[in-house]
Each structure stands twice: as C-alpha cells, then as structure tokens.
C-alpha cells in the first residue's frame, strides 16, 4: 500500500490506472470496515485522494462507484473504531473529500443531495481540536456552492439542538478563549 501511495502522486499513475480497477479495490478495502485494519483504510483514502486530485475521469469514476456515499459514512466520527489512529483516518477522509468532490460540480451536488453538509457540521461539533480547522475548511469550501446554503440553514445539532450559526459562534468563542483573547461587552 505504501508503494502505491507514493506512486499515486505522479500524473502518469493517475491517468494510466484510470480503468485498471484500482478504485474498485480501494473502495472494497474501505468498505471492509473492521475486517481491515484502520491504517490500511487510511492508506486507501490517501491513494484515492491522490488519484482524484485534478483528474476529472477519476473523480467521475469515484462518484459512480459509490465513493461519495462512503466518504459520508466514514466522516461520521463516532463510527470510527480505535484499532488505529482515528484522527489521521478522519483527516485522510477529509483530504479525499477535498480532492474527489470539491471543485467538481456533479460530485458537489451529489454530496449535497446525500446531506454531506450535515455530516460535516456534526463532525465540527464533536471532533477534537486537531481536526476542527480542517473540518471548518471543508465546510467553508462546500458553502461556496450556492446550493449548499439551505443545508447549512436547516442543520441543527442532534446533541445540543443549536443551529449552524450558533455552532460557528461557539467554536469562535472557544478559539478566542484558547488564545487568550479578552472580549468585554462584545468589543475586542
């Protein structure tokens, strides 16, 4: 897997292995769940991210093979078992989301249709600090799509019943507190 991961960074690899069935194999590894060690699933997402980055044909195949649905399932942070490093696994899933979905209109629309914005907001609410910025970056990127706004407005937390705007304000306040920014009466 490590050799394929290194090779997947080269443009030659991306184009020559387009119809080789590699995407099928990588998706099968990820779908195996706990039958396959978390590190191998992480490598599979990293390879998928590399071969989809800037390659429309691979992005299209990834979408057609059910890769976007698999991204949504794996972004459910509470679903990750602890057989490896869960943080780096989720990071690889977000990286794959960025490379295989963002910037591709059809893939973005599909991600919106399967309520991917809700999953990203849920993740932002529950993830650890080390993942929060990357997750917020993914939310900002998908919100550049005008059709995503309705999902942002409709979301409410299953844990605390706050809405998306309230979540972002809470996260902003937590960052201020973490960095020692004093706010008196709403003024810096």
Image (spheres, rainbow, N blue to C red):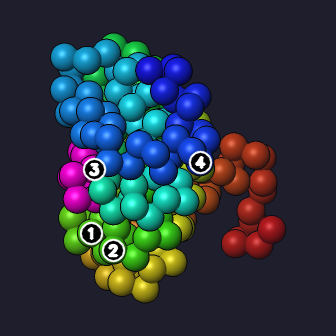
Residue of label 1: 110
Q: Which residues are magenta?
A: 63-74
Separation (CA) of disc 4 from disc 2: 23 Å
Q: Nearer the viewer, residue 137 or 13?
A: 13
Marks 3 and 4, how far apart in space? 21 Å
Q: Residues within 10 Å of mark 1 (few under 14, many from 20)?
A: some
Does the magenta-highlighted stretch encompass residue 66? yes
Tag nearer the camera, 4 or 1: 4
Residue pictured at 61% horizontal, 41% vertical: 10
Query: Relative to 160, is 40 above or below?
Result: above
Mark 3 vs 4, N-terminal side: 4
Q: Check residue 106 in the rendering and tell me which mark sits there, or answer none.
A: 2
Q: Secondary structure at mark 4?
A: helix
Q: CA distance from mark 2 to mark 1?
A: 6 Å
Q: Position of residue 118 (x, y in %)?
A: 30, 62
**Foreground tag (3 vs 4):** 4
Q: CA distance from mark 1 to mark 3?
A: 11 Å
Label 3 SS: helix
Mark 4 or mark 2: whose residue is earlier in sequence: 4
Quadrant in which the N terminus is drawn: top left
Q: Residues within 10 Å of mark 2 (few under 14, many from 20)?
A: some
Residue at 39% from the left image edge and 55% from the top image edge: 58
Q: Is residue 71 at least partly visible in the picture?
A: no
Say which residue label 4 marks: 11
Q: Nearer the viewer, residue 83 or 56?
A: 56
Separation of residues labelled 2 and 3 (CA atoms): 13 Å
Q: CA distance from mark 4 to mark 1?
A: 26 Å
């Amino acid at each position: 897997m490590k050799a394929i991961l290194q090779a997947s960074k080269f443009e030659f690899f991306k184009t020559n292995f387009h119809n080789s069935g590699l995407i099928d194999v990588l998706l099968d590894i990820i779908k195996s769940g706990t039958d396959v060690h978390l590190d191998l699933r992480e490598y599979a997402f990293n390879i998928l991210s590399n071969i989809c980055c800037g390659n429309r044909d691979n992005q299209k195949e990834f979408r057609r093979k059910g890769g976007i649905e698999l991204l949504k399932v794996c972004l459910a942070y509470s679903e990750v078992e602890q057989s490896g490093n869960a943080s780096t696994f989720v990071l690889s899933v977000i990286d794959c989301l960025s490379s295989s979905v963002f910037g591709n209109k059809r893939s973005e629309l599909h991600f919106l249709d399967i309520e991917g914005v809700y999953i990203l907001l849920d993740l932002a609410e529950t993830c650890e600090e080390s993942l929060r910025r990357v997750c917020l970056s993914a939310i900002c990127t998908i919100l550049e799509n005008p059709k995503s706004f309705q999902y942002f407005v409709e979301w409410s937390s299953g844990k605390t019943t706050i809405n998306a705007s309230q979540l972002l304000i809470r996260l902003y306040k937590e960052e201020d507190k973490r960095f020692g920014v004093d706010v008196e009466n709403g003024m810096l």
